[in-house]
Structure formats: C-alpha cells, structure tokens
Amino acid sequence: MSGNTNTDILLAGAVAAFTVDLLVYPLDTLKTRFQSSDYARLYTHAGTQKPNPALFRGLYQGVGSVIIATLPSCTSSFFQRFIITPSAGAFFTTYERTKSLFTHVNPSTTAHPDGIIPTPVIHATASSIAELVSCAILTPAEVIKQNAQMVSAGSPTNATVQTLARFRSNPLALWRGYTALAGRNLPFTALQFPMFERLKVAIREYRDRRGKTTGSVFESGMITAVSAGAAGTVAAVVTTPIDVVKTRIMLSAAEDAVSEASASSKSKQSHGKGASEGLVDAFGKSVESSRDTVKSAARNLNPLISPEEKGKRSAWKIGQEILQEKGVRGLWRGGLLRGVWTFVGSGLYLGVYESGRVYLASRRGEDVNEEDLL
C-alpha cells in the first residue's frame, strides 16, 4: 500500500527545498550577478575586465526570503503538525495529485494499454500546472532575492531589508516578475520531468537486469538524484536565454517600484497645488492632473511608442537589448554555471524529497510502492 500522506509530501518537499537552498545558493548569487546588466560596472576591474573581489562577497544575501518561501514553520508539537509556507509544498502536492488524476482518467485501449495520452505528456502537463501554482507564491521571494543579491556587500543595512524598503510604497511590484518566472519555469519543468521519469525507470531496469537492486532508501535517493540532476542540467542549459531575460526583468522591478512611487508622490503634490489654487475640472481633479492623465493614456494606447517611453520594457525588448549589447553569447551568459548548480540542486532536491517520503512512511511501518513515487 502507499504510506504517504499529504503531510509526508509537504514535509519532504520543504526539507528538500531547504537543503538545496543552503547548499547551492552561492552559485545562484553568482549567476544573478553574471546575468545582471551591471555586471561589468560592479564586479569587474575597469582595465582588465576580470572579476573583482566584490563578485564573491555576500553570496548568501537574500537567502532569508527563499527560506521563508520554502521552510515549514512548526506549531506547539513539531512531530504532529506542520504548516508549510507553500512554495515547495504547493508544487509537489499539485504535481502528485494532477499526475494521479490524469493517469486515472487516461482512457486505455488494446493498442495503448497504458492510455491514449503518452505518459511523458501527462508528466509534462502535471508539472506545468504545478509550476504555475508555485510561481504565484514564489515570485515575491524571487524578486526580493535577486535584488538583494545585487546589494553591495559592505552595506551596513541587511540586503533583504534594503530591498524590501524599495517596495514599501508599491508592494504589488513584487509580482511583476511572475510572467517572466513562469515563462522560464514552464519550459524547464516540461523538459525536465519527462526526462527525469524516463531516466529513473531506465536506471532501475538496468539495475534489475544486473541483479544490483537493493530496495533501500539510499538506492532510491541516488537513482532519483542522478536522474533529476542529468535531466535538470539539460533543461537548464536549454532555457538559459529565458533565464537571462527573467533576471533582468526582476532586477528592474525594484527600480520601477521606486520610480512609480516617486511619480505618484509628485502627482499628489500637483493635485494638492491645483486644488488649493482652485484649478479643478468637473470631476474635482486638478486641470494639470487631468491633462497628464489624458496624455498618459494616449501614450499607453499608441502602438508606435516604445516600451521604455511607456515606463516598462517588455521581455522581447530586453532580449533585443541583450543581443545588441553582448550578441548571442549574452543570452547564454551564466549557462554553464546554471547547469552545474542545477545538476547539484535538482539531484539533491528530488533525491532528498523521494528519500524523505520513503523514510517517513517506513517510520510508520508502511511501504511506498515504486509507482507511487515521484
């Protein structure tokens, strides 16, 4: 029988995420700095263009926001009840339940005993749906994290606190990178999970043929780690251009939030001045404010005006700018580093997750069938 409960899945997912966050976070910080438009100015020597010591300082800046998004917080009884801050838990719960539902309703025929819809399609669809749910929760933490990673390491104020202060007047800007994050993670998971599932089966079959299968938790974790690491590396390298654009968008979110707050403040001052002078229209707004509103609306509706003039840049425009500045190589910046830390991260993440599920079930004297695992 399957011995896993929702608590097992949530707890295993959170522990896996926390383990990976601590181990590979410095590599993620380096990747963010490599992909930043300010990399040459902040992290290289002007004369030689070689990395300076600042590149390797503060490698754990912003890690708190990621821990908050993945760690379980416990109630009075640690071993009885867990409340997961739901990024990692939401992904795995949604993935497991969606995959199970699609597998259950998938009609089978004589020619297709396992179902008409291929198993890789089911895995890719389930992981994509889970990723959309997870991204909605993770986006604010990701925006805070990447902006904190760029704060000068010598600053007396905590990097995360500094970053949060920039969003204080416009907290909704924390979700500005949702589309970019989903745009990167959807193709990543759609590529990774089918490859991961197939590799895991292939390795198990290979070990069965050689008579090397032990059925231990360690074996299960190692097979999962190798499969996930290999699949994750391929998916990471392929989606690097999207990741570069995503990094630029998220790093600009803080600047946009500050700019919008400043513009709003000036607008309010203008309203107050107009009202005090009696220059109001039929709706009670200052005449100057009404003119600005009409001009702004016209500019936003005009397709001939560039995204920069509207105040925001599209992902497509940012990609074009990177091509103009750095060429095609610019879109693959940080790809090797991302591939390395994804191999380590994905392997540990899914390896710890699956091993955790087996361990938690075995503590209760129950078994987890192979088909019930991720």
Image (tube, rainbow, N blue to C red):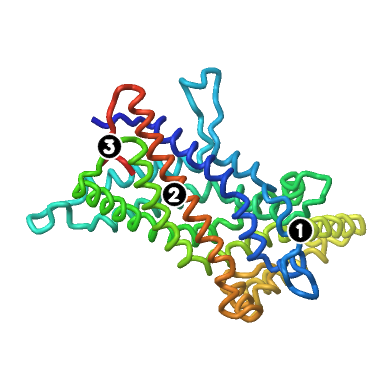
What residue is pinned by disc 3? 215
Report how far apart the C-alphas of labels 2 and 3 lie in the structure.
19 Å
> Which residue is identified by label 1?
54
Residue 96 in percent (x, y) is at: 34, 43
Q: Amino acid at mark 3?
A: Gly
Estimate how packed mark 3 is, as few (under 14), some (14 to 19) or many (20 or more) residues with alpha carbons within 10 Å: few
- Tell me which label, 1 or 2, sits earlier in the chain: 1
Disc 2 element: helix
Q: Quadrant of the C terminus?
A: top left
Q: Residue 330, position in %: x, y?
A: 60, 74
Q: Is residue 96 visible?
A: yes
Looking at the rendered structure, the secondary structure element under dot 3 is loop
**In the drawing, does residue 144 fall left or right of residue 263?**
left
Q: Residue at x 63, y 65 (%)?
A: 35
Distance CA(mark 1)–CA(mark 3): 47 Å
Q: Are marks 2 and 3 in contact (CB under 8 Å)?
A: no
| Tag 1 and tag 3, C-beta contact below 8 Å | no
> Observer-nearest residue: 73 or 300?
73
Q: Residue furthest top?
A: 76
Position of residue 154 measured from the top left corner of the image (x, y, whole percent) = 82, 51
Q: Quadrant of residue 270?
A: bottom right
Q: Nearer the viewer, mark 2 or mark 3?
A: 3
Q: Is residue 352 above or below residue 34?
A: above
Amino acid type, mark 1: Ala
Depicted 257 relative to depicted 37: above or below: above
Q: Residue 336: image x %, image y %?
A: 53, 65
Choose the circle earlier in sequence order: 1 or 3: 1
In terms of secondary structure, where does tag 1 sit? helix
Q: Residue at x 87, y 60 (%)?
A: 274
Residue indicated by mark 2: 347
Please tell me which residue is depicted at 12% across the width and 52% down the height of the picture. 113
Position of 254 with respect to 289 (left or right) is left
